[in-house]
Image (cartoon, rainbow, N blue to C red):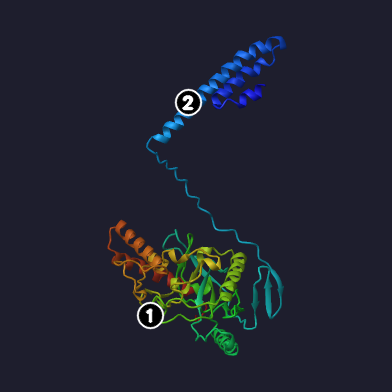
């Protein structure tokens, strides 16, 4: 009876009060319980009818009044960390090939050695006079294109496509140019062993939140796609900056990158394109090579869009960027490396203003720092390199 009455009391406050009063009464003797409950129940039902009527009236009045738009408070944005790398292990290995648990297969027919990897990494927050820390494990990945002539990627061209790919691999092997090459069919070839230095990036520049790298030949692995950057003015948008990749090349790049990140604990932010890191020390110009200045499929390879990262060559060492055709007084072109140039230029100008100097004068200070770092790196390089 108590539960049945409580279910008919619409107002939750009244229902709670009813149960608080009636609950203790249930311990009374049966002869006194009914006399106690009847007035309480009638009172509670009356209160329920009163409050229910008030609620109905308020609802009717609200419908006839001017509508009120209620805006929910915006939830705090949830910043997700980088996805955790799955464990990748070697399933099979021979002198000819390696197979990994994520489906990666590396062909080692063209594998050669150079000299063991060793390089200096400079602490970002350390003193300018720091001599650097000597390291041997790869700190990042640079993505390239072979810039070799491209035939139509069609079934009828298989013989010529394979011939062109083999010729390209033989040239890369002679030059010791990259650690890995992904041909147009998506086949992954090891050229220079990961333990050794490849001639893929020269004295390029990159930095993460802890370390500054000035010799990416030694500090970063080089992965090149069999592809060619179109001439400027080519392509539907006129940019001419995006090599064409086959879907198989992108899939292979994803599993190769996944394996290298897992094996060497490489930060995702240290996976960048050749255009982002390439510099010319002679004239202090960034963009000495411009392959993958735009259009690299970061997300499809399982990486963040690192085009938005301010270019360290500009922020740390004051390099110019005339070769990219970027004008800070004009709106930035959409996408690609221009986002990183704009962010770096903004940072450089703000730093110069905080130090009370003009940007040109601050660039001279940064250039001197680069020359010192470059001399330190060259002092520990093997002879003839």
Q: Which mark is residue 29?
A: none
Residue identifier under label 1? 233
Eyeballing the image, is 47 above or below 129? Answer: above
Query: Which element is circle 1 on?
Result: loop
Q: Position of residue 286 (x, y in %)?
A: 39, 73
Query: Which element is circle 2 on?
Result: helix
In the foreground, 114 or 186: 186
Residue lying at 63% horizontally and 18% vertically, measured from the top left: 22
- Graded by Cα atoms within 10 Å as few (under 14), some (14 to 19) or many (20 or more), the crowding at tag 2 reads few
Q: Which mark is residue 54?
A: 2
Q: Is residue 375 visible?
A: no
Q: How many marks?
A: 2
Upstream in the sequence, badge 1 or badge 2?
2
Q: Position of residue 85 (x, y in %)?
A: 61, 61
Mark in front: 1 vs 2: 2
Q: From the viewer's perspective, is 317 left or right of 82?
A: left
* Mark 1 and mark 2: Cα distance apart in space: 74 Å
Q: Position of residue 20 (x, y in %)?
A: 61, 20
In the foreground, 61 or 318: 61
Quarter of the N terminus within the rendering: top right
Q: Position of residue 19 (x, y in %)?
A: 61, 21
Q: Which quarter of the figure has residue 41?
A: top right
- Graded by Cα atoms within 10 Å as few (under 14), some (14 to 19) or many (20 or more), the crowding at tag 1 reads few
Eyeballing the image, is 356 above or below 101? Answer: above
């Amino acid at each position: 009876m108590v539960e049945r009455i409580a279910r008919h009391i619409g107002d939750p406050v009244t229902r709670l009060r009813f149960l608080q009063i009636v609950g203790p009464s249930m311990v009374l003797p049966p002869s006194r319980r009914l006399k106690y409950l009847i007035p309480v129940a009638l009172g509670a039902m009356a209160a329920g009818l009163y409050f229910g009527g008030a609620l109905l009236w308020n609802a009717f009045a609200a419908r006839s009044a001017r509508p009120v738009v209620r805006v929910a408070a915006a939830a705090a944005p949830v910043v997700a960390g980088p996805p955790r790398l799955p464990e990748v292990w070697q399933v099979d290995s021979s002198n000819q090939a390696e197979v990994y648990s994520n489906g990666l297969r590396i062909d080692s027919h063209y594998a050669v050695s150079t000299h063991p990897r060793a390089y200096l990494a400079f602490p970002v927050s350390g003193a300018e006079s720091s001599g650097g820390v000597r390291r041997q494990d790869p700190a990042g990945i640079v993505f390239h294109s072979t810039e070799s002539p491209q035939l139509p990627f069609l079934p009828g061209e298989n013989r010529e496509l394979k011939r062109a790919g083999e010729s390209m691999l033989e040239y890369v092997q002679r030059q010791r140019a990259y650690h890995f090459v992904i041909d147009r069919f998506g086949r992954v070839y090891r050229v220079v062993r990961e333990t050794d230095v490849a001639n893929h990036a020269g004295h390029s520049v990159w930095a993460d939140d802890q370390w500054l790298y000035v010799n990416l030949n030694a500090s970063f692995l080089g992965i090149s796609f069999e592809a060619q950057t179109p001439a400027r003015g080519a392509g539907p948008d006129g940019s001419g900056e995006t090599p064409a990749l086959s879907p198989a090349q992108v899939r292979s790049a994803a599993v190769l990158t996944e394996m290298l990140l897992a094996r060497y604990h490489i930060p995702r932010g240290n996976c960048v394109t050749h255009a982002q890191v390439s510099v010319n020390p002679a004239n202090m110009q960034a963009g000495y090579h411009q392959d993958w200045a735009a259009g690299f499929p970061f997300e499809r390879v399982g990486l963040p869009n690192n085009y938005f990262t301010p270019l360290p060559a500009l922020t740390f060492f004051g390099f110019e960027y005339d070769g990219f055709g970027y004008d800070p007084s004009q709106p930035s072109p959409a996408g690609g490396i221009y986002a990183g140039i704009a962010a770096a230029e903004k940072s450089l100008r703000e730093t110069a203003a905080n130090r009370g100097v003009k940007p040109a004068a601050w660039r001279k200070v940064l250039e001197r720092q680069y020359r010192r770092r470059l001399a330190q790196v060259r002092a520990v390089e093997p002879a003839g390199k």
